[in-house]
Image (cartoon, grey):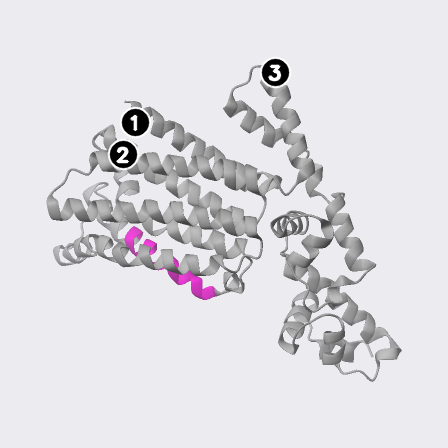
Amino acid sequence: MIFTAFFNTAIFQGMVLGTIILKSPLFKSNANKYLAYAIFTLSLLIANLVFEILDSYKIVPFLLFLDDIEWAFLFPVFIFMFVIHQVNHPIRNSKKIRWLFVPFLYSALANIIYDCEVVAHIFKIPIVLKTVIETLKDFDFYIILIFIPFMAVYTFSFIKFSKDKQEKKWIAFLWSLVFTLLLSWIIAVLIALFFEYDLSFCMRILALFATFLIHFTAYYGVFKYRLADNKQGIEALLNKSVVLLTEGFSKDVIFKKEIETANLDLFTKENPYFKKLETLCEVHQIYRDSTLNREKVAAQLGISAGYVSQLVNAITGDNFANFINNYRVEAVKKMIFDSDFENYSLLAIGLESGFTSKTTFYDAFKKATGMTPNSFRNTNK
């Protein structure tokens, strides 16, 4: 019962934490979105263990639809998506990464079809097809033996692209916890298969580790790291914490109130860091520097690179690269209208505005205007 109570608390906190990360403007970013999805998935994995401990599958057989799907395929993919968005790697925009979801979709499809007959009795599967589906279901674990180690190595290879030391340290530690949990689970299952060992106690220990992972993410990943970049936000949150503590609120209430009552104006165009960023772009034209990146801007603003991305994402709904490229596109348009640049080639104008290559220039210009630079110039002659 102690295990069950502890796991129920962890599931609840995981769901609350994931919802807060998704809904609060304080945490709005594509990276955090995938972190929230990972927390939801981890909470669901713990919930499946609780259902098993309580024999809930006998009471409510339809819960088997959740248990039979191999969610372990999905959890590491969300962690991978979080990492590549956090370090702002170009692969985050590649459609090829969708293939990483194929093992989960395969598992979900095979198990749902099977449970539609065995659990829900919706239809009757032909014997031959049922045999094939059962084989596919049994093959899940063998795929996991390859998939999870692959995801561990593949995800780790992208951590090095973070140029913020604090960010890199946090991501690396999160990675080590996640894949220690997943690889330990694989080892435990293999031992159980070969030595006929009862996994129930081992699974509970791993679930305890998973609950620690949720708490770690909440404290270090969300508060200590993510909001530490926002000095004003932290001060506001700490002040509200003191007030709530003097009123005798529990920690859970403090956590909720901090998010609900935080100064949301910090993530509007009135944000002092964002206003300074606009000044740097509009007055000092820092976008003309072709080597400009988050780290350079962060150094000028006196904040971290991670907070620069979070600020731009939350206020503009776009990423840092597109934000800067939009200024470059506007500079190109002005030069096209300026007779002093009449004899300049479009590529020269693009490079003068800060673009690093013809491809980047043309892609960004068409994305912003719906026209190629050539079409724009011809239209406005």
Tell me the quadrant of the picture where the C terminus can be found: bottom right
Count of numbered circles on the image: 3
Q: Which residues are magenta?
A: 95-108
Which residue, given by chain and number where applicable, does mark 3 sit on?
246
- Which circle's residue, 3 or 1, is located before the other in the chain? 1
Does the magenta run of residues contain 100?
yes
**Percent x, y for residue 314?**
64, 47
Q: Which mark is residue 306?
A: none
- Does the magenta run of residues contain 168? no
Label 3 close to label 2 by CB (< 8 Å): no
Q: Quadrant of the N terminus?
A: top left
The residue under label 2 is 204
Q: Identity of the amino acid at label 3?
A: Thr
In the picture, the disc for residue 3 is 1
Query: Where, by quadrant of the figure, is residue 283 drawn?
Result: bottom right
* Vertical comparison of 73 with 24: above or below: below
